[in-house]
């Protein structure tokens, strides 16, 4: 396992990061990502907005997701590592 692969695998240990990478296999806006990851019954939707915002920043810093034309999309390598270690 390369150092890059190990770093990406470590980032994917967090459930929200895995959910975002899976969901962004196809491009999605930030609002769509928040809607997808926020439970239907929550007393604090702002918490999930902050959680997604922080996760997107981390994923982008590791090159696992990119932003173009107003939408986020997962990188090929993050999808490959997700599939390899977490069953896609």
Image (tube, grey):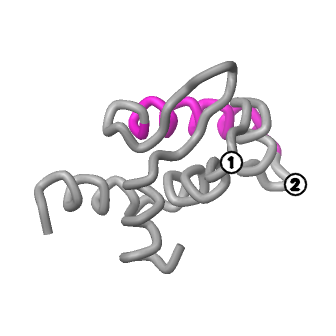
- Judging depth in this view, the residue of 85 and 73 nearest the camera is 73
Report x, y in % for residue 21: 55, 53
In the rendered image, the quadrant that contains the N terminus is bottom left
- Judging depth in this view, the residue of 79 and 44 nearest the camera is 79
Residue at the extreme right: 40
Which quadrant of the view contains residue 47? Answer: top right
Q: Is residue 3 above or below residue 48?
A: below
Report x, y in % for residue 39: 79, 55
Q: What secondary structure prevails in the magenta region?
A: helix
The crowding category of the residue bearing disc 1, from other C-alpha atoms within 10 Å (few below 14, some 14 to 19, many at least 20), is: few
Question: Which residue in the protein does label 2 denote?
Answer: 41
Report x, y in % for residue 71: 67, 28
Residue at the extreme front: 76
Residue at the extreme top: 69
Question: Which residue in the protein does label 1 denote?
Answer: 26
Report x, y in % for residue 78: 41, 55
- Judging depth in this view, the residue of 39 and 76 nearest the camera is 76
| 20 part of magenta stretch | no
Q: Dot 1 lies on which element? A: loop
User: Which comes before the other along the chain, label 2 or label 1?
Assistant: 1
Q: Is residue 74 above or below residue 28?
A: below
| 51 part of magenta stretch | yes
Instruction: Identify the magenta region.
Output: 43-59
Q: Is residue 38 above or below residue 15?
A: above
Mark 2 or 1, which is nearer the eye?
A: 1
CA distance separating discs 2 and 1 = 26 Å
């Amino acid at each position: 396992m390369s150092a890059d692969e190990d770093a990406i695998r470590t980032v994917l240990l967090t459930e929200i990061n895995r959910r975002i990478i899976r969901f962004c296999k196809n491009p999605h806006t930030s609002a769509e990502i928040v809607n997808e990851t926020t439970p239907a019954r929550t007393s604090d939707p702002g918490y999930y907005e902050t959680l997604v915002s922080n996760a997107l920043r981390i994923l982008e810093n590791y090159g696992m997701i990119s932003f173009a034309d107003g939408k986020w999309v997962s990188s090929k390598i993050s999808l490959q590592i997700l599939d390899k270690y977490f069953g896609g």
